[in-house]
Amino acid sequence: MQITLKNPLDMHLHLREGDTLACVFPFSFTSFAGGVVMPNLSTPITSTALAMDYQEKLYALSKEFEAKVALYITPNLNKQELLQAKEKGVKILKLYPKGSTTNSQNGVSEILDKSTLEIFSIAQELGFILSIHAESGGYSLDREFEFLEIIKEIAINFPTLKIIIEHLSDRRSIEVLERYSNVFATLTLHHITLCLDDLLGGGLNPHLFCKPILKSPKDRDALLSLALESHPKVCFGSDSAPHLLSKKLTSPASAGIFSAPFLLEQLCTLFESHNKLENLQSFISDNAIKNYELNLQSNKIITLHTSPCTIPSSIPMGKECIVPLNAGKTLPWSISLHS
Ligand code: NCD
Ligand code: ZN
């Protein structure tokens, strides 16, 4: 059996910098035609100049991967910078509540104050997409739910601003997605297949520690249904977030799951096991093209066939390594060479 996917897109991806970038990027550019690259680098991408510089570094490593680098919102972002960003083709602004996740210390602490609302207003006027790490500073399992009030406020006040709830993790968010025409979401592989017990129900598994934290089996199953049905307001965004093994094993452990290796093989396996392979194309590409109004240059065709492949137990990184999601697992699908 085989399946062909046209222009797979990963709409939420952390590629990092330097040696890590060189190590992890090939997993994405060999399988995907493009995607949204997150700006939470050690020096966050807070200006158009930094975004262009990063885009060039990515281009030097792959001429084919259409990287849409997101611009990190700080309280200092102004109209002049946004005009320049638009002129250079930046489409996506990323909002990190200050302190919510890895490298978010330059993020925004008062999301509904006058100066941030002014940024949203200009973003709406200029046609940017607002991508949000939607978590409050409250109790871990309620952080996304608590943040929904802010999402609703932005959705109502800026009705033509497209808002993306990144890495949807809580089934209580689905209602907001369905109620507001300008609210969309990305879904990760881990939030649709795993729950809190996979992280800590047996022994603690630091490789499954991420933000937002994995939730209940009911949350997982509701999100999985959105993906399998390829709900028109969701698309795939892996949130692949590599951290060195040593950073996962020290306390506090870094949050993030390195899911980039063998993503398409895993998604094919998942969709096939639920008899929904016919919906994979829209989940992995078509919905994103519509929702983000993408004008792709690529015409990347990936063919997968039923032949086993095994996810490596770790990926060497200098003297260290990075452990991928589902390390050591054998999958029934492989990407065909020369696909
Ligand atoms: C991400 C990272 O490591 O950059 N971590 C994570 O747990 N998902 C940041 C993010 O998207 O929250
Ligand atoms: Zn992320």
Image (spheres, helix red, strand yellow):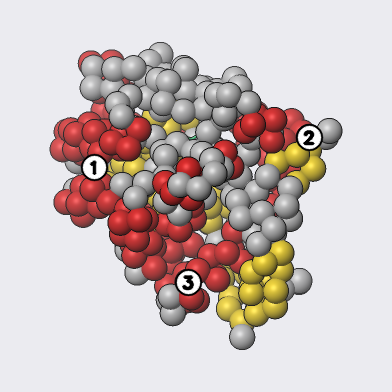
Give me the C-alpha separation between circle 2 and circle 1. Answer: 46 Å
Residue type at the position of mark 3: Phe
**Residue under numbered circle 1:** 160
What residue is shown at x 84% (from left), y 33% (from top)?
Answer: 319
Does residue 268 sit above or below 313 in this rendering? below
Tell me the quarter of the image containing the C terminus: bottom right
Work out whether residue 339 or residue 147 is closer to the camera in this orientation and state it.
147
Q: In the rendering, at what x and y percent does residue 327 appear?
A: 66, 54
Report if residue 295 is visible in the image.
no
**SS assignment at label 2:** strand
- CB atoms at circles 2 and 3 under 8 Å apart? no
Q: Which dot, 2 or 3, sits closer to the camera?
A: 2
Q: Residue 76, how many percent across, how many down?
A: 40, 14
Left or right: 44 with respect to 293?
A: right
Query: Is the residue under label 1 in contact with that under label 3 (CB below 8 Å)?
Result: no
Q: Residues within 10 Å of mark 3 (few under 14, many from 20)?
A: some
Task: Give the mark nearest the N terminus, 2 or 3.
Answer: 3
Given the image, on which type of amino acid does mark 1 rest? Thr
Q: Which of the numbered marks, if any, corresponds to residue 213? A: none
- In this view of the protein, which residue sits in the foreground, 110 or 276? 276
Labels 3 and 1: the sequence-earlier one: 1
Residue 312 to residue 12: above or below: below
Q: Amino acid at mark 2?
A: Glu
Q: Which quadrant: the N terminus?
A: bottom right
> Residue 147 at x, y = what percent?
26, 33
In the rendering, at what x and y percent does residue 214 appear? 42, 45
Left or right: 61 with respect to 329?
right
Side (left or right) of 16 relative to 252 = right
Of badges 2 and 1, nearer the viewer stands 2
Disc count in the image?
3
Q: Residues within 10 Å of mark 2 (few under 14, many from 20)?
A: few
